[in-house]
């Protein structure tokens, strides 16, 4: 299983049309869309009534925190939303103090770029998103260019904090009605994708894409269930059993009934009782069924990795962000722009896991912004009918952005662009032609300069991360195979080994996909990646059979599995 001799990779063809292709909306697109409207509307309407709409930019900074953490269980969501509000306030405080101390545009752009890099790295390390760092960067960068005095800073921060507290309440509002809603959705998604994979595998048309998607969905379901570290409830334990069944389907699709998985998924999506699965070889409620969840309890007790250890691999991405945002802002200033933060935010929004994805985001951003300025020109006459009309237009753009962005980033940007332009009019109306021209120029500058910076700062450690992921899979596979072959393996150890191997496979695929989109690096060991995935999947199947979650296929199959999974 040796890899090919490393050779320089060729320059890849960059997608254009493919980057604009529309996908399916998220199953919960309406949740962030309605939440942001509910979070923005009361503070903004109150300021309209008080005749102080010029302060709405500060309340909106806190209100936009309602966009986050909709996929997380409520216990975890409470903490994440609190940290998002604190992070937003921290960036806002730095921006406000800097704006009050200097009006030097170069200094302001530099501070904005450094803030963007920190926000990008922390959001990626903690996996806060969507919308990740972009909202935080927009708030802090825009505020840098609003004239301030030190005496105004506490009041403006208080407005943002009050709106952030309201956004926290909005985000937590559904908890009393559906306390396990996020876990139910994640479990249903895992069951649906496992059923789809089982159908393709049983039909003889097994798809690597379907398999990867199914493993990713199952892994995401476990992450969601494990995110709630409080004492497991009866409902959550029932959901964990269903995710175990999805794992079983991935390990042995030929022995899986896809219709049954889909029926479970449909039942889970509702608000009724979670269906009981039982054990295929034991009576429901027996010791064997409970053994499946021993590893879950052990995994829940493991503390997450320290933040500093997760920030290290993100150093190239942080450098890209800082350099690209700073250069985009400087070029915008050199062209005489009044709002260089538009170019800065455009550059900050580009940076994804690799260069190919960064290019796709650049195409999406440019197309979405160009169409968006046309929409802004169309809605401006309505927005300028009065303060209330302006707020209603902002609310409509907020809703439209969240409703559409799940289908493709450029489609959401069509609403995000007029939203950003309308926010600039909160203190007072400005010439439409000037706003449109500046936005188009800054978009092009931010996209071109930002992507150029991504080309200059390559991630040369991507290949090493693939090697480490391969090593992790090999070790996890050897451990699982050893326990599966042992006659007296403890159920908890076997369950933990199976879940560890499944997580390692998901991490390997994500790491390999991210590295494949990087340029100017040695050839990746694609053959080893594929072989490692195949061996891991066979070991997972053997482990599932060893746990008694599937009927023994017979002596011949058992011998084959033993040969396949031998380390």
Image (cartoon, rainbow, N blue to C red):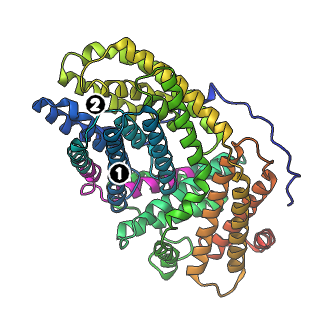
Residue 289: x and y in percent read 50, 76
Residue 389: x and y in percent read 21, 22
The reply to whether the C-beta atoms of the residues labelled 2 and 1 are less than 8 Å apart is: no
Residue drawn 53% across and 52% down?
A: 259
Q: Is residue 40 above or below residue 257?
A: above
For the question of whether residue 451 can be seen, the reply is yes
Q: Which mark is residue 90?
A: 1
State which quarter of the image contains the N terminus. bottom right
Front residue of 179/329: it is 329
Instruction: Pick out the residue farthest to the bottom.
Output: 488
CA separation, marks 2 and 1? 25 Å
Front residue of 427/36: it is 427
Instruction: Pick out the residue farthest to the left.
Output: 50
Q: Is residue 187 magenta?
A: yes
The number of numbered badges drawn on the structure is: 2
Residue under numbered circle 2: 395
Q: Is residue 219 above or below residue 118?
A: below
Question: Which callout, 2 or 1, points at the residue further toward the start of the chain?
Answer: 1
Dividing the picture into quarters, in which one does residue 46 lie? top left
First to last magenta residue range: 166-194
Element under label 1?
Answer: helix
State which quarter of the image contains the C terminus. bottom right
Q: Residues within 10 Å of mark 2 (few under 14, many from 20)?
A: many
Residue drawn 68% across and 70% down?
A: 476
Residue 544: x and y in percent read 63, 70
Residue 358 placement, left or right of 168? right
Dividing the picture into quarters, in which one does residue 42 lie? top left
Q: Is residue 46 above or below residue 154?
A: above
Q: Residues within 10 Å of mark 1 (few under 14, many from 20)?
A: some
């Amino acid at each position: 299983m040796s890899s090919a001799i490393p050779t320089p990779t060729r320059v890849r063809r960059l997608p254009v049309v493919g980057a604009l292709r529309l996908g399916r909306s998220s199953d919960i697109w309406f949740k962030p869309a309605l939440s942001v409207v509910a979070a923005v509307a009361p503070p903004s309407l109150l300021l309209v009534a008080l005749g102080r709409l010029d302060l709405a930019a500060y309340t909106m900074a806190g209100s936009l925190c309602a966009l986050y953490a909709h996929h997380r269980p409520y216990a975890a969501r409470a903490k994440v939303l609190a940290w998002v509000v604190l992070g937003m306030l921290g960036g806002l405080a730095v921006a406000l103090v800097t704006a009050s101390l200097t009006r030097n545009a170069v200094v302001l752009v530099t501070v904005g770029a450094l803030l963007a890099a920190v926000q990008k790295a922390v959001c990626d390390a903690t996996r806060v998103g969507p919308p990740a760092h972009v909202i935080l960067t927009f708030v802090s960068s825009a505020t840098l260019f609003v004239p301030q005095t030190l005496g105004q800073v506490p009041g403006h921060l208080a407005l943002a904090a009050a709106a952030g507290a309201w956004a926290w309440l909005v985000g937590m509002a559904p908890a009393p009605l559906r306390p396990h809603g996020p876990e139910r959705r994640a479990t249903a998604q895992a069951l649906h994708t496992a059923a789809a994979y089982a159908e393709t595998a049983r039909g003889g048309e097994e798809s690597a894409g379907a398999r990867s998607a199914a493993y990713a969905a199952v892994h995401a379901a476990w992450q969601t269930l494990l995110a709630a570290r409080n004492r497991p409830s009866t409902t959550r334990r029932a959901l964990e059993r269903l995710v175990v069944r999805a794992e079983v389907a991935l390990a042995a699709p030929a022995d899986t009934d896809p219709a049954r998985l889909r029926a479970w998924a449909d039942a889970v999506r509702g608000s009724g009782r979670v269906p009981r699965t039982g054990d295929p070889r034991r009576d429901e409620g027996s010791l064997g069924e409970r053994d499946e969840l021993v590893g879950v309890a052990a995994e829940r007790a493991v503390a997450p990795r320290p933040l500093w250890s997760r920030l290290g691999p993100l150093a190239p991405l942080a450098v890209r962000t800082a350099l690209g945002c700073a250069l985009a802002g400087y070029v915008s200033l050199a062209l005489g722009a009044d709002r260089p933060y538009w170019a800065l935010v455009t550059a900050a929004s580009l940076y994804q896991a690799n260069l190919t994805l960064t290019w796709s985001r650049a195409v999406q951003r440019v197309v979405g912004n160009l169409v968006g300025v046309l929409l802004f020109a169309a809605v401006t006459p309505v927005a300028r009918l009065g303060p209330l009309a302006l707020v209603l237009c902002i609310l409509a753009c907020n809703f439209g952005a969240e409703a559409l962005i799940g289908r493709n980033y450029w489609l959401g940007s069509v609403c995000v662009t007029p939203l950003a332009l309308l926010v600039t009019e909160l203190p007072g109306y400005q010439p439409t032609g000037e706003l449109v021209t500046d936005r188009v120029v800054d978009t092009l500058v931010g996209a071109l300069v930002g992507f150029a910076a991504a080309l200059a700062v390559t991630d040369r450690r991507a290949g090493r991360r693939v090697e480490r992921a391969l090593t992790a899979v090999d070790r996890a596979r050897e451990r699982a195979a050893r326990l599966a072959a042992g006659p007296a393996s403890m159920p908890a150890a076997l369950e933990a080994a199976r879940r560890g191997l499944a997580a390692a496979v998901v991490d390997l695929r994500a790491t390999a996909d991210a590295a494949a989109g990087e340029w100017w690096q040695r050839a990746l060991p694609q053959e080893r990646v594929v072989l490692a995935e195949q061996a891991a999947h066979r070991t997972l199947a053997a482990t599932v059979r060893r746990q008694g979650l599937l009927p023994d296929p017979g002596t011949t199959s058992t011998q084959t599995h033993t040969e396949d999974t031998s380390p």
